[in-house]
Structures are given as structure tokens and as C-alpha cells.
């Protein structure tokens, strides 16, 4: 499953599918781009980050892709599990002292 | 591992009252960030401190103030509370001002009635 276009508020997938969550950022000066996962009633939890001089970074079951030409960031989750259900936020660092969050995408995983 | 501690976890206040939220960063972390998250919204940066000095300011109302103390804990003071101040308030901490390595606390849910 994939959130089509720049941003969709919800993405529903089946357990075991791959998920792609998209994000558009606004500031070309950002050094880092970060993905956070937020479960209901909890604070954002770091998933993975990517530096602006990279275009791809892989973690455990997650991959982040950065396309600076169109200011687009995506998070790919492989073999999505019910425990991945949460709101996902991208964030950018246009200054060295403040993190700016994008609009979240709610991922729902059904088994 | 120790995490960011916020207190109280829940707070109910009436309009025009004041509130103080506290944040205790991860041990040895010297940088604290405050965020406000309205219902269904993304977190909005309010203010940050590095080594007890304010390092950046975001969309923080003039009715709000904050400081970081010598033990690196921080307090967010909110006065003349309005209904629109009802939100989750998160504190995050990092080491050496590393913006991309912030660890978030569980948040304080403020309800203004």
C-alpha cells in the first residue's frame, strides 16, 4: 500500500504487505530529515533519519528515500505488522535549533 | 534506559488560570525542546534551550514562558490559559544540541475548561 501523492491522512494495508508513506518538505536548507512513529497517547518515537547529502538509507525493515529535486521524502516499511499501526510524521531541520514536523499519516494494519 | 520524564501527565485548568509543566531530560542531555500538539495535528515547535540558554523560539504565545535550570530540567509556564491551549505538550531532549537525535517524553495532556 502507498499513500498517493504528497500526503494522505490515512493508509490501510494488510499484514505482510509493504507500506510506503510519503511526505513533502518545504525547506531546501534542511540538513536532516527524520521519520517518527507516534502511537496513541505517546510521544513521537524516532524511526530513521537521512542526511541531505544522501538519497537512500536503510534500517531494520524500513527504508527512507530522499528526492531533493522535488523535495520529497518517503518511508518504506517492509512486511508491515499490526504493531506498525500508528501515526507517522516526517520532520525536517531548516535551522540547527528547531525541528519542523510535517502532517502525519495514520497507518492502519489489518491482520 | 532512562527516558525523558514529564510531569504532570494530565492537567485540567480553567480559563485564565496558570499552569506549569515540567520536563526532566535524559541524564547528561543538555538540550531541551518543547512542542505543542493539538488534536489530530502535527507537533508544533515552541521553544528550545541548550546549556540553560534559549536557543530557538517557534510559535510560542507571549503568555507562555520557559526556562532551563542548572540541573537541565525545564519548565514551561503558561498564563491566562485559553480553551485553544488544550493540547498535548511534549518535551524532548538531546545531547549537544543534536536536533536529529531528540528523544521525546510521554507528554502532558492539558485540558482547559
Image: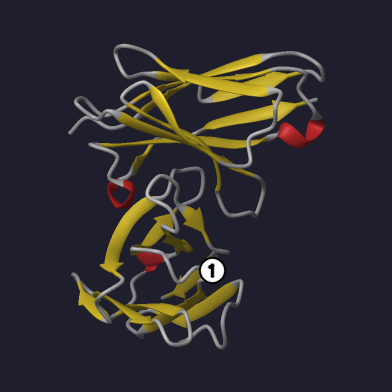
Mark 1 = which residue?
A105
- Residue A69: quadrant of the picture: bottom left
Q: Residue at x 54, y 70 (%)?
A: A26
Of residue A51 and residue A102, the one placed in the foreground of this image is A51
**Chain letter of disc 1 in the image:** A
Does dot 1 land on a helix, a strand or a loop? strand
Question: Residue A108: percent from the left, percent from the top?
Answer: 50, 70
In the displayed structure, does residue A47 sit left or right of residue A12?
left
In the displayed structure, does residue A80 sit left or right of residue B107?
left
Q: How many marks?
A: 1
Q: Residue at x 54, y 63 (%)?
A: A102
Question: Residue A100: percent from the left, percent from the top?
Answer: 50, 55
In the displayed structure, does residue A83 sit left or right of residue A105?
left
Disc 1 crowd, CA 10 A, few/some/many (<14, 14-19, 20+): many
Of residue A47 and residue A11, the one placed in the foreground of this image is A47
Quarter of the picture holding the C terminus of chain B: top right
Amino acid at each position: 500500500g502507498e499513500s498517493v501523492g504528497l500526503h494522505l491522512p490515512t493508509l490501510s494495508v494488510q499484514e505482510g504487505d509493504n507500506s510506503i508513506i510519503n511526505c513533502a518538505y518545504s525547506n531546501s536548507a534542511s540538513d536532516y530529515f527524520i521519520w517518527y512513529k507516534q502511537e496513541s497517547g505517546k510521544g513521537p518515537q524516532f524511526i530513521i533519519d537521512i542526511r541531505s547529502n544522501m538519497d537512500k538509507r536503510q534500517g531494520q525493515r524500513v527504508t527512507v528515500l530522499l528526492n531533493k529535486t522535488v523535495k520529497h521524502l518517503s518511508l518504506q516499511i517492509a512486511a508491515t505488522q499490526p504493531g506498525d499501526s500508528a501515526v507517522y510524521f516526517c520532520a525536517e531541520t531548516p535551522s540547527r535549533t528547531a525541528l519542523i514536523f510535517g502532517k502525519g499519516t495514520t497507518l492502519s494494519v489489518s491482520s | 534506559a532512562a527516558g525523558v520524564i514529564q510531569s504532570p501527565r494530565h492537567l485540567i485548568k480553567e480559563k485564565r488560570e496558570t499552569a506549569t509543566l515540567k520536563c526532566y531530560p535524559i541524564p547528561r542531555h543538555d538540550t531541551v525542546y518543547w512542542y505543542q500538539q493539538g488534536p489530530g495535528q502535527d507537533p508544533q515547535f515552541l521553544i528550545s534551550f541548550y546549556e540553560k540558554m534559549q536557543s530557538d523560539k517557534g510559535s510560542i504565545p507571549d503568555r507562555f514562558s520557559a526556562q532551563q535550570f542548572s540541573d537541565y530540567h525545564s519548565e514551561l509556564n503558561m498564563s491566562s490559559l485559553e480553551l485553544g491551549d488544550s493540547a498535548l505538550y511534549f518535551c524532548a531532549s538531546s545531547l549537544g544540541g543534536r536536533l536529529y537525535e531528540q528523544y521525546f517524553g510521554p507528554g502532558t495532556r492539558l485540558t482547559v475548561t
